Image (cartoon, rainbow, N blue to C red):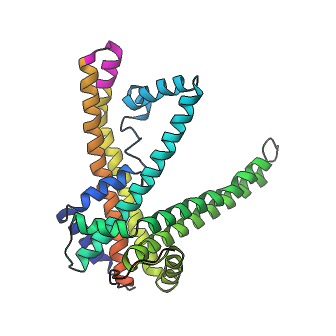
Amino acid sequence: MTIEIGYIFRRMLEIIRKDRFLWLFAFFIAFSGAASQSYSLSFSSPIPRGFTAFSPWHKAGEKLTSFASLHMPLKVFLIVVAVVIGLAMLALRAFSEGSAIGGVADLEAERPSGIRSAARHGWAAFFRFVAIVVLYAILSAALAVPSVLYLNAFKGSKQFVIPCLGGIVLGVGFIVVVLFAGIIVQLAERFIVLEGSGVFHSIKQALNAFRVYWRDVLATWAMVLGVNLVSLLVTMIVLGIISWPFTWLFKLSYDHHSVPLAALAILAFFVLWGLVSLVIGAFALAASTTWTLSFLQIEPVALPTRSPAAF
């Protein structure tokens, strides 16, 4: 193999520990919901699922939804707001991930690095990064259509074996193709940021890189999978340890209708939210850094000095 797994792992830990300017982008990645657990800090509550009724987000959303269902103009307004927020999260994801990739490449090339220089990479690749994320989302949605149509075709049928076997085949096929597409997107994103490639050209470059270095790419994917699994485990443990005291505080404030307790509960919610964001952001940065370090070993590049391609 071309990549040095031991070096990548050690260097990834070193970058996360020492180069703290990247933590800002890690927080944005987690906030936008682009982290491995698909846990969006902007919408998700760190309160256990059985107690979500005591979350301020849940209570406010419940009342607002009930009120909006009776007032069509407000319902339309909320839909528009939801779309705008979704686009904002997409933009934040594109900027933060592009910045993190550029920042790590600067560090590896011993170039001047910091928030400003990393952000320049994010802005330079912004629209192409958004485009490839959207293309991946469209592809994932399109690949799910055959499975949905197949299951609907057997809806109400008394047959069991054929629908199950077909569903398994389609499900496994969907997972394999989506995982492969995700790997190609990871490579293409780095061609976009580090070589200034256009969207479609970056996909061709990524496919060619996978063809030549497929062992290295799969080894990197396995490393990132390990990071994601550890991230999920650590996040669950952290939530399990620190969320229950806060949850009971919410319950007390709800049961006793106490304004001071409610204020303290809301403050506690944001403290817990911040702690969870640190954990998720750190692992999101670890995964992104691992991909970037591996990419720089299989595809040594110079950061683009020319104007980037449009598509």
256 in the magenta segment: yes
In the rendered image, the vertical position of residue 114 relative to residue 26, given as above or below:
below
In the rendered image, the vertical position of residue 102 relative to residue 29, given as above or below:
below
| Residue depicted at 33% across the width and 39% down the height | 240
17, 216: nearer the viewer:
17
**Numbered marks: total:** 0
Residue 198 image position (x, y, % from top left): 48, 76
Asked where in the image residue 250 lies, by quadrant, the reply is top left
156, 208: nearer the viewer:
208
Residue 19 image position (x, y, % from top left): 19, 65
Residue 65 image position (x, y, % from top left): 52, 28
Taking the image as shown, residue 161 lies to the left or right of residue 46, namely: right
Residue 243 image position (x, y, % from top left): 31, 35
| Residue depicted at 20% across the width and 79% down the height | 110
In the rendered image, the vertical position of residue 266 relative to residue 152, given as above or below:
above
298, 175: nearer the viewer:
298
- Magenta span: chief secondary structure: helix
Most extreme residue toward the top is 256
Residue 245 shows in the view:
no
Asked where in the image residue 171 lies, by quadrant, the reply is bottom right
Residue 105 shows in the view:
yes
Q: Which residues are magenta?
A: 249-259
| Residue depicted at 68% across the width and 61% down the height | 169
| Residue depicted at 57% across the width and 35% down the height | 76
Most extreme residue toward the right is 158
152 in the magenta segment: no
Location of the N terminus by quadrant is bottom left
